[in-house]
Amino acid sequence: MKLSTKSYYGLRGLAHLAKEDRPCSVRKMSQEEGIPQKYLEKILQELKRAGLLYSKKGADGGYRLSKKPKTISVAKVIDVLEGGISTAPCLGRGINNCPQINLCQEKGFWEKLAKNLNQALEKITLDQLVK
């Protein structure tokens, strides 16, 4: 399983914010983290819509975490940005286009693997990522 660049950048952006004591501009995060600014802005907007961030406009504005870093799990971030953990194409959200879905002997394995991965990622928080 490989996470998308979107989740990778999203986690880096949130980790950056977890270290800040004040709002941080997208421009600053983009420069310091080496993430394209427009892409980062889109990712942060998604995280804001999910309630993980809030933003403030103006000279002293920017993004901030809306929750404490120890309460935001890696699993939550991936769920927001990816739609959850998927270990096989047939297990993604709303995806049931596999012609072998009813005959698949491996489906149970892929489901168990996804469940275990999700449980492990639920235990990892932003607070832990920045320490």
Image (spheres, rainbow, N blue to C red):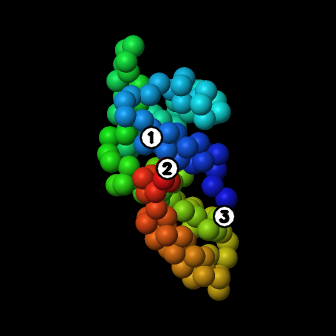
Residue type indicated by callout 3? Met
Whole-number angstrom distance, CA of label 3 to CA of label 1: 28 Å
Along the polypeptide, which appears first: circle 3 or circle 2? 3
Q: Which residue is mark 1?
A: 19
Residues packed near mark 3 inside 10 Å, few (<14), some (14 to 19) or many (20 plus): few
Residue type indicated by callout 2? Val
Q: Secondary structure at mark 3?
A: loop
Along the polypeptide, which appears first: circle 3 or circle 1? 3
Residues marked 1 and 2 touching at CB (< 8 Å): yes
Measured from the top left, where is residue 87 in percent x and y? 62, 68
Q: Secondary structure at mark 1?
A: helix
Label disc, if present, on residue 130 of the rendered structure: 2
Q: Which residue is mark 3?
A: 1
Which residue lies most toward the left here?
A: 67
Measured from the top left, where is residue 107 in percent x and y? 60, 79
Q: Is residue 65 above or below residue 92?
A: above
Q: Is residue 121 above or below residue 77?
A: below
Q: Secondary structure at mark 2?
A: helix
Along the polypeptide, which appears first: circle 1 or circle 2? 1
Residue at image location 56% in from the left, 33% down from the top? 40
Residue at image location 65% in from the left, 82% down from the top? 106
Label disc, if present, on residue 117 of the rendered structure: none
- Count of all numbered marks drawn on residues in the image: 3
Q: Is residue 32 above or below residue 85?
A: above
